[in-house]
Image: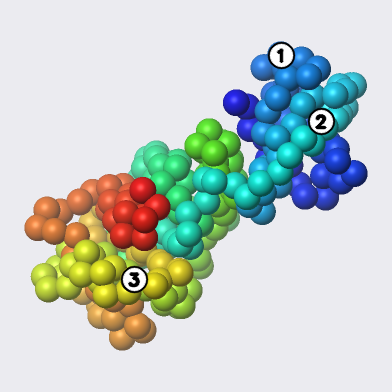
Amino acid sequence: MARFFVAASNIFGGIAYLNGEDLDHIKALRIRDGEMFTVCDGEGTDYSCVLSKVDRDTAEVQILDKAPSKGEPSVNCTVYMAYAKGDKIEHVVQKAVELGASSIVLFPSKRCVSRPEGAALIKKTARYSKIAEEAAKQCGRGKIPTVITAPSYKAAIEQAVRADVPLFCYEDEKELSIKTCLEENPRMKTVSIVTGPEGGFEKEEAAMAVDMGMKCVTMGTRILRCETAPLCALTAVMYATGNL
């Protein structure tokens, strides 16, 4: 069934109003009067609707029923990913949204090869946000996860450490596993996952993260690629919290 995200301000009086790209999408799908589809307000509520009227600039859809979105996990998990080369970030954004991430934060670290700035960073972030929106529609999310950037490594850690369980994924950690860390915190409501760039974190970066309150964890004996690590950790969180 087709799914559209509409601002809550465009839903009132038993009617939802769609325009812009959503209107174009309705026309492209050739949805006819009386056909059902889903409208989501982006705040966790789904509306079962039927198309009632289409004109040049707006589509009006009648709301038949509403219910909490089933696609939202019970845990709020933010993925913090260091800048990576090529289309790796696009891949992680898309899959992280499908797996249930609440947001994705991109940040620079010492070994990052790619360090977008200024207009290039704005353009890339807008593209990542669009990918997140499309993935949210496709997989039935009730909210569109945000994709934002942190100005520095320290700023990213300062944000990440506020979670109930702040996970710092580090290949040189040998003792505390992500499995053990998650099992020790069964009532977690918020989780942060921090992963590094292609070359991994510097030892000084890992030490800073631990000093600031991050839990340094290992995900096993194998070295994971920078685009694999955040998705692996996110899957572990969703499994541990009953969201898989």
- Secondary structure of residue under mark 3: loop
Camera sees residue 202: no
- Secondary structure of residue under mark 2: strand
First of labels 3, 1 by sequence position: 1
* Three-letter amino acid code at the position of disc 2: Val
First of labels 1, 2 by sequence position: 1
* Residue 30 image label: 1
Mark 3: few, some, or many residues within 10 Å (few <14, many ≥20)? few
Task: Decide which of 73, 221 is in the foreground and name it.
Answer: 73
- Secondary structure of residue under mark 1: loop
How many labels were placed on the picture?
A: 3
Q: Is residue 37 above or below residue 180?
A: above
Horizontal arrangement in the rendering, residue 116 relative to residue 122 (left or right): left
The reply to whether the C-beta atoms of the residues labelled 3 and 1 are less than 8 Å apart is no
The reply to whether the C-beta atoms of the residues labelled 3 and 2 are less than 8 Å apart is no
Q: CA distance from mark 3 to mark 1?
A: 47 Å
Q: CA distance from mark 3 to mark 2?
A: 42 Å
Q: Which residue is mark 3?
A: 186
First of labels 3, 2 by sequence position: 2
Quarter of the image with the N terminus is top right
Q: Position of residue 110 (x, y in %)?
A: 32, 66
Q: Picture quarter containing residue 134? A: top right
* Three-letter amino acid code at the position of disc 1: Arg
Q: Residue furthest bottom?
A: 211
Q: Position of residue 193 (x, y in %)?
A: 36, 63
Q: Which residue is mark 2?
A: 61
Which residue is pictured at 40% across the width and 52% down the height? 243
Which residue is pictured at 77% across the width and 50% down the height? 8
> In front of the other: label 1 or label 2?
2
Q: Is residue 112 above or below residue 127?
A: below
